[in-house]
Image: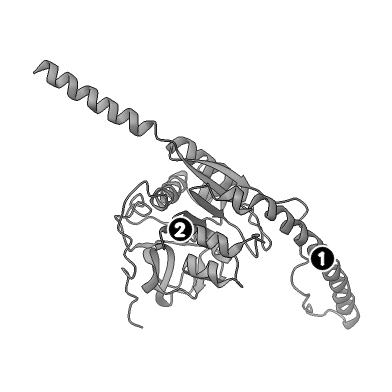
C-alpha cells in the first residue's frame, strides 16, 4: 500500500513538473499609434509585462512607438463671443499655418513609421509568435503585409486588443471583420456597471456582481452580436441613459485563431492599482484595477488556448427596441 501510494505521488509530481516546464507562450505587444495616443500606453506596457511574468503564461516583446510623432494643432478655431472679426481671422490664419506645418511633418513621420513597421512586423519576424496584443493602438499601423497578418490570426494565432484597438485600421475591412466591431465615438468619461453576458468565461469570471468602473466608454458601429461571443455590455447608453444594447467586451473564434477584445482601458487607474495611489486623480480603486487585470489575463489565456471555454457566437440577443 505504501509503495503504491509512493508511486502515485511520483506520478503526480512528474505530471506537475511536466506542466510547469511547458514553455510560456510568446506574445508580441504593439503600441504604435498614428492617430490619438493615450497617456495610459506606458502603463499598459508595464502591466502586460508584469502579468506575463506573474502568471507564467506568456512572455512579451514590444513594438513600441517610433519617435518623432508631430502633434496635431487640433480643431479649427470657433469665434468667441465679443471677438472682433480681425482677431478671429488672425486666429484662423495661425491655425491654418500650424495645420500646414503639421500635415507636412506628419507625412514625413508616416513614411518613417512605414519603414519602421516594415522591419519590426515583417512576416518572417512575427510568424513564430503565438499571439499579438494591440494595446491602445490607433490609426493605420502601416503593417507591411496587413492581409498576411490577418491570415496569421486565422491560421491559429491569438489576437487581443484593448480600448482603442477598436479605433484602429478603419479603412481596412480585414481588420474590422476580424475584431468584430468598430469605434464610432465616445462621450465624457463615466462610471458604469457592465452586465455579464457570460459569467463563466475566463475573461468575465473574475468580475464580481455589481462591479463598477470609471472609464471612457466607447460606442460602436459595424457591430453584430450574432457574429461574436458577448462577454460584457450595457443595456443603456453610458452617458444619456437611453435604453439599448451597448457592447463593452467580446470574443470570437476566427478561423483556427481566437480574438478577445475589451473596450475598457482608457485610464491609467483602470490598468494599474498603484498609479497615483491615494490622490484625487484616481477614479478607480486598486481593487477595480486588479479586477481589470484579471479580466484581460483571462481573455489572453483563452485566446492562447491555455483555458478552454465556450465561445458560441450569438449568445447574447439584443433587447427588443
- Quarter of the picture containing the C terminus is bottom left
Figure disc tally: 2
215 to 281, vertically: above or below: below
Residue that sits furthest to the front in the current view: 124
Residue placed at 36% from the left, 65% from the top?
229
Compared across the picture, whether 195 is left or right of 44 comes to left
Residue for badge 1: 102
Q: Under tag 2, what secondary structure?
A: loop
Mark 2 to mark 1: distance in Å?
40 Å
Coloring scheme of the render? one colour
Give the class, few, some or many, for how many residues have Cα within 10 Å of label 1's Cα (few <14, many ≥20).
Answer: some
Residue placed at 56% from the left, 59% from the top?
149
Residue placed at 34% from the left, 57% from the top?
210
Q: Can residue 278 be seen in this view?
A: no
Compared across the picture, whether 117 is left or right of 266 comes to right
Compared across the picture, whether 110 is left or right of 215 comes to right
Residue for badge 2: 155
Image coords of residue 244 (percent x, y): 40, 76
Residue that sits furthest to the left in the current view: 1
The answer to which quarter of the image holds residue 318 is bottom left
235 to 28, vertically: above or below: below
11 to 284, vertically: above or below: above
Give the class, few, some or many, for how many residues have Cα within 10 Å of label 2's Cα (few <14, many ≥20).
Answer: some
Compared across the picture, whether 202 is left or right of 66 comes to left
Image coords of residue 88 (percent x, y): 85, 78
Residue placed at 69% from the left, 51% from the top?
119
Q: 100 or 243: which is nearer to us? A: 100
Q: 109 or 149: which is nearer to us? A: 149
From the image, state whether disc 2 or disc 1 is nearer to you: 2
Q: Under tag 1, what secondary structure?
A: helix
Image coords of residue 148 (percent x, y): 56, 61
Amino acid at each position: 500500500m505504501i509503495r503504491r501510494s509512493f508511486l502515485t505521488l511520483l506520478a503526480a509530481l512528474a505530471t506537475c513538473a511536466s506542466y510547469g516546464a511547458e514553455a510560456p507562450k510568446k506574445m508580441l505587444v504593439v503600441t504604435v499609434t498614428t492617430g490619438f495616443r493615450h497617456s495610459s500606453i506606458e502603463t499598459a506596457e508595464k502591466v502586460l509585462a508584469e502579468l506575463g511574468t506573474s502568471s507564467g503564461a506568456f512572455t512579451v516583446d514590444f513594438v513600441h512607438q517610433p519617435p518623432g510623432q508631430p502633434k496635431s494643432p487640433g480643431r479649427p478655431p470657433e469665434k468667441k463671443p465679443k471677438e472682433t472679426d480681425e482677431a478671429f481671422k488672425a486666429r484662423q490664419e495661425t491655425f491654418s499655418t500650424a495645420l500646414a506645418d503639421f500635415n507636412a511633418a506628419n507625412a514625413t513621420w508616416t513614411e518613417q513609421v512605414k519603414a519602421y513597421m516594415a522591419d519590426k512586423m515583417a512576416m518572417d519576424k512575427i510568424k513564430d509568435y503565438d499571439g499579438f496584443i494591440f494595446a491602445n493602438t490607433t490609426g493605420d499601423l502601416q503593417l507591411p503585409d496587413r492581409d498576411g497578418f490577418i491570415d496569421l490570426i486565422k491560421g491559429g494565432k491569438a489576437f487581443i486588443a484593448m480600448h482603442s484597438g477598436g479605433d484602429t485600421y478603419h479603412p481596412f475591412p480585414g481588420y474590422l471583420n476580424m475584431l468584430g466591431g468598430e469605434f464610432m465615438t465616445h462621450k465624457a468619461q463615466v462610471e458604469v456597471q457592465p452586465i455579464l453576458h457570460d459569467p463563466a468565461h475566463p475573461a468575465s469570471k473574475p468580475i464580481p456582481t455589481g462591479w463598477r468602473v470609471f472609464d471612457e466608454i466607447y460606442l460602436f458601429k459595424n457591430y453584430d452580436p450574432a457574429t461574436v461571443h458577448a462577454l460584457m455590455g450595457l443595456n443603456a447608453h453610458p452617458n444619456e441613459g437611453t435604453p439599448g444594447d451597448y457592447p463593452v467586451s467580446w470574443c470570437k473564434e476566427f478561423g483556427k485563431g481566437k480574438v478577445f477584445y475589451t473596450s475598457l482601458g482608457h485610464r491609467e487607474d483602470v490598468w494599474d492599482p498603484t498609479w497615483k495611489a491615494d490622490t484625487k486623480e484616481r477614479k478607480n480603486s486598486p481593487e477595480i484595477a486588479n479586477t481589470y487585470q484579471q479580466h484581460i489575463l483571462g481573455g489572453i489565456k483563452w485566446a492562447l488556448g491555455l483555458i478552454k471555454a465556450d465561445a458560441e457566437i450569438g449568445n447574447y440577443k439584443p433587447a427588443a427596441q
